[in-house]
Amino acid sequence: MGYFVNTTGIDFTIPKENLDKAYRDMCKLNKDDSEKMGGAFGNLENTEDITGSSSVSTNPNKWYMWMPWNYDEVCKNTAEIFSALGFEVAEDEDGNLSLLWYEDKSGQEDLFLKTVSPYVKAGSYIEWSGEDGYLYRHEFDGEKMEVKVGTIVWKPIFS
């Protein structure tokens, strides 16, 4: 099961000069298991040999939803992490990273977006629609992310 969402409008850019900082901060998220909503349940011991892993995560039984437990090791840059989250990404001719669209189960992309918000071009936004018609929008001011809920208002244009 899961909750399917898709982007209905998107204008999101991380300038080239901020990509390394965004990557570093997204990788740091993997140190703390407290916000990870994916993982094995019960009293399972680590089922994967983590010897030799360079991941900051020490528990392969806990991960962010739909992400590899060691994404900070297998994803080599910001674009690869956003791709692993489910976004379609592109770099422009100047090396700036843009998110193009998302259409999949909702995971924990909001946590990663909040983490990179200081590095996102001011005025960027992502508009979402849930499978039940729920509308919301992430807005970025160059320092933080704000989440807004949307509604549709139908007005007559003639009668």
Image: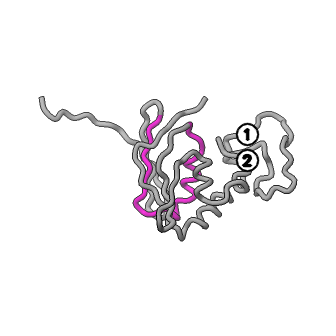
Q: Quadrant of the C terminus?
A: top left
Q: Residue 8: x percent and y percent?
A: 41, 42
Q: Amino acid at mark 1?
A: Gly
Residue at the image point whose x is 35% and y is 38% from the top: 151
Q: Residue 95: x percent and y percent?
A: 51, 66
Q: Residues within 10 Å of mark 1 (few under 14, many from 20)?
A: some
Determine which residue is flagged by label 2.
Answer: 69
Q: Residue 40: x percent and y percent?
A: 76, 37
Q: Quadrant of the N terminus?
A: top right
Determine which residue is flagged by label 1.
Answer: 39
Q: Amino acid at mark 2?
A: Trp
* Colouring scheme applied when the structure was drawn: one colour
Q: Nearer the viewer, mark 1 or mark 2?
A: 2
Left or right of 133, for residue 88: right
- Is label 1 in a helix, a strand or a loop? strand
Left or right of 57, for residue 80: left
Left or right of 125, for residue 29: right
Task: Answer with the quarter of the image where residue 73 lies.
Answer: bottom right
Q: Is residue 126 above or below residue 41?
A: below
Q: Residues within 10 Å of mark 2 (few under 14, many from 20)?
A: many
Residue at the image point whose x is 45% and y is 56% from the top: 12
Residue at the image point whose x is 47% and y is 46% from the top: 101
Q: Which mark is residue 81?
A: none
Q: Residue 48: x percent and y percent?
A: 84, 44
> Where does the magenta region start and end?
105-130
